[in-house]
Image: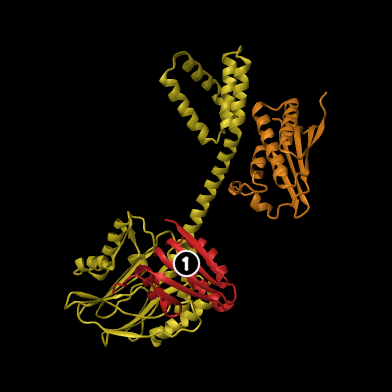
Amino acid sequence: MRKVIDSNIENYKNLLKSYIETQDERSLYGVEMMSKSFLKNNILPEEIVNLHIQALEDLYPDLSEEIKHSMNFLLEAMISYGLKHQEIQTLREQQIALKSEISVAASMQDTFLKTDIPTIEGLDIGAISAPAHQMNGDYYHFVKGKNGTLGMAIADVIGKGIPAALSMSMIKYAIDSYPEESMEPNVILENLNRVVERNVDPNMFITMIYAQYSPAYNKLRFSSAGHEPGFHYYAKDNRFEELKTKGLALGVLADVEYQEYELKMEKGDMVIFLTDGVTESREEDRFVEVEEVLDVIRKYKTYSAQEIVNHVYKYFERLQDFQLRDDFTMIILRKEV
Amino acid sequence: MELSIDLVEKSNHLIIRLSGEIDAYTVPKLKESLLPLTQKSGSVVEVDMESVSYMDSTGLGVFISALKSTKENDSHMKIMNLNDRVYRVFKITGLDEIMDIGRSNKVERK
Amino acid sequence: MKPQSSCVTIQKEWDIVGARHVARDMAKTLGFGTVDQARIATAVSELARNIYLYANNDGQIYFDMINTIDGKGLSIIAVDSGPGISDIAEVMQDGFSTSGGLGAGLPGVKRLMDEFDIQSELGKGTKITAKKWVR
């Protein structure tokens, strides 16, 4: 630090001299470059003032006492700014460290929660999940049963960020421990509810839909724990219908029973599941209406299920100026033949 | 957007009037005012939501904590005058069936 | 010859100025440059303000000139019988200064001086030792 100042003292003095004599722009440019290098080397403001005092005294040995005192006064006034500068510097370094820690956690979470989309006979599956911040509080999960059935979950933890993401890992391990294919969707939710109720903070809760599709019967059975309703797209009428479901969110009460619903999928029919990051998204002061989501789906209905969810995501990302306010998750199941 | 909270107290009957938006930023304030009220045994807490234009799921979290607290402390909470959008959040999550909830006393659209 | 050590009792806000004055005089005598004089005075200000604002106006600041083979310097010891600091680590963290509460200026004092040590006991008081060496 001293070295930087010492090595610049002559230079500073010359620039100052030249400026005082001619008021040239070149000296000002010179001092601009010097000030940048001071900043890079963490030179504090009081030291710059001191540098100025030294240069001034060298150039004008008969400098008036008033001016000298006034310069010391300025130096004194700079001390607290110097302190703040150092503090902010340290905080900035801490912030960088924190950010990189979070990004490690986020990539660990991605590995933990990773789920591959299975190949199910006669079913085209698309899924997308994007976090608003680094860590995702939404979750989806697929599993293929021995008899060729599909098990599927979509979930949303209230809140965003790290606490939400931690709760999701718990859900994932709980589901993984169940013999899913031999359990009914409502029983899975009843079990998960007990896990969540016992293990999370009273003001946290999770909403979830669990669904099973059986290719042999073209039937989808599902139960909802307070989750944003899904939609059934009837291909032959080109029409969407909301899936009316009832059920309390996970983690609110200790013992809850869930209802099971069933629907039959015809050729070209789609079932759409989403999280409230989709319907609660706001553009300026306007809420996105569900109709708008469905219109985008309808527009891209000839594409594959994965392409449709990608398009819906892109549409909302643009609507929200590429800064999602909430985690966004959408799954589409389409019966192919 | 801000959330303002007014409290009217008549012995064991407490009315808490909210106006503005309930989201992650205003939730701590709501929690701080609402939870202590539900901790008084035998009290009846009426939450007037007539001027709440928006509530996200973090807001529900506070009402769930408050509900749990009423059960532990033998108090009661009634949520009043919800607009359609806010009511929808309670309905989807199934909370409308376990909480004492009154919809808007303005003309209902359906 | 100036005194080698001195003590200022902090009871009123004006005493903070008195403490700064003593510190600057001793720093000058020891041969500290203008920048370091200003830093020492600011550090003393922070220590004295802590006593004035939070230690029930009950504390002293001791100044001692150090002159050994290791070098010349100024030692400042601030002692009070105030409430004490429960979490020293928290107080010493950057960013805490925004709280404006007890001990808020301490990370600054540590930066302004070369050596810094703090001992505190809840309900009994705090002792802060800081030194700066003439370069």
Rendered shade, chain A: yellow
| Residue found 54% across the figure and 35% down from its top | A41
Image x and y of residue A72, in percent: 62, 25
Q: Which chain is red?
A: B
Q: Nearer the viewer, residue A30 or A77?
A: A77
Query: Viewer-proximal residue, C13 or C38?
Result: C13
Could you tell me residue A94's position as x and y percent? 54, 50
- The part of the image, by quadrant, that contains residue C25 is top right
View extreme (left): residue: A236
Left or right, residue C17 beside residue B10: right
What amino acid is labelled 1 in the image?
Answer: Ala
Helix, strand or loop status at disc 1? helix
The quadrant the C terminus of chain B occupies is bottom left
Which residue is situated farthest in the front direction here? Answer: B10
Residue in the foreground of this view, choosing between A312 and C83? C83
Quadrant of the image containing the N terminus of chain B: bottom left
Q: Is residue A304 left or right of residue B32?
A: left
| Image position of A245 (left or right of A72) | left
Residue, disc 1 = A164
Question: Percent from the top left, x then y, of residue C6?
Answer: 81, 33
Question: Residue at 78% of width from left, 43% of height from top?
Answer: C59
